[in-house]
Image (cartoon, grey):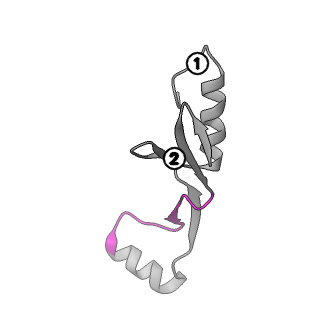
């Protein structure tokens, strides 16, 4: 756990979402592909930040970006 400006920051490697690799825009085709090839998913880090009271939950990759942006006084805008 780390602190930024008195706010607790929980850095988590489990802050992920899954994405189906092979997709089609039609639901019918997706059902067939899932039956034939199975569902293959990849896990990607979530870009969003959860803020609750005085706590923040963020993925490790984006926490490093956040620290870089906050330490640079010329660029205080996040994720530009």
Residue 13: give x, y in percent of width and height. 63, 58
Which secondary structure lies at badge 2?
loop
- CA neighbours of label 1 inside 10 A, class few (<14), some (14 to 19), many (20+): few
Q: Which mark is residue 10?
A: none
Residue 75: give x, y in percent of width and height. 58, 18
Residue beneath disc 1? 75
Residue 79: give x, y in percent of width and height. 53, 31
Q: Residue at x 51, y 65 (%)?
A: 18
Judging depth in this view, the residue of 39 and 36 nearest the camera is 39
Residue 76: give x, y in percent of width and height. 54, 21
Judging depth in this view, the residue of 1 and 77 nearest the camera is 1
Q: Is residue 78 above or below residue 22?
A: above
Mark 1 to mark 2: distance in Å? 19 Å
Q: Work out whether mark 1 precedes mark 2 in sequence or the reverse, and give the earlier one.
A: 2
Q: Is residue 21 magenta?
A: yes
Q: Is residue 30 magenta?
A: no
Q: Read off the magenta span.
A: 13-27
Which secondary structure lies at badge 1?
loop
Q: How many marks are shown on the rendered structure? A: 2
Residue beneath disc 2? 47
Q: Quadrant of residue 14?
A: bottom right
Q: Residue at x 39, y 44 (%)?
A: 53
Q: Point out the residue furthest to the front here.
A: 6
Mostly what secondary structure, the magenta segment? loop
Q: Residue at x 58, y 58 (%)?
A: 44
Q: Is residue 71 above or below residue 22?
A: above
Judging depth in this view, the residue of 10 and 63 nearest the camera is 10
- CA neighbours of label 2 inside 10 A, class few (<14), some (14 to 19), many (20+): some
């Amino acid at each position: 756990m780390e602190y930024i400006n008195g706010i607790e920051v929980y850095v988590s490697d489990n802050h992920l979402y899954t994405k189906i690799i092979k997709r089609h825009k039609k639901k019918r085709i997706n059902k067939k592909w899932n039956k034939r090839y199975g569902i293959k998913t990849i896990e990607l880090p979530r870009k969003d930040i959860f803020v609750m009271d005085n706590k923040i939950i963020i993925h490790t990759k984006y926490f490093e970006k956040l620290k870089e942006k906050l330490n640079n006084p010329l660029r205080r805008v996040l994720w530009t």
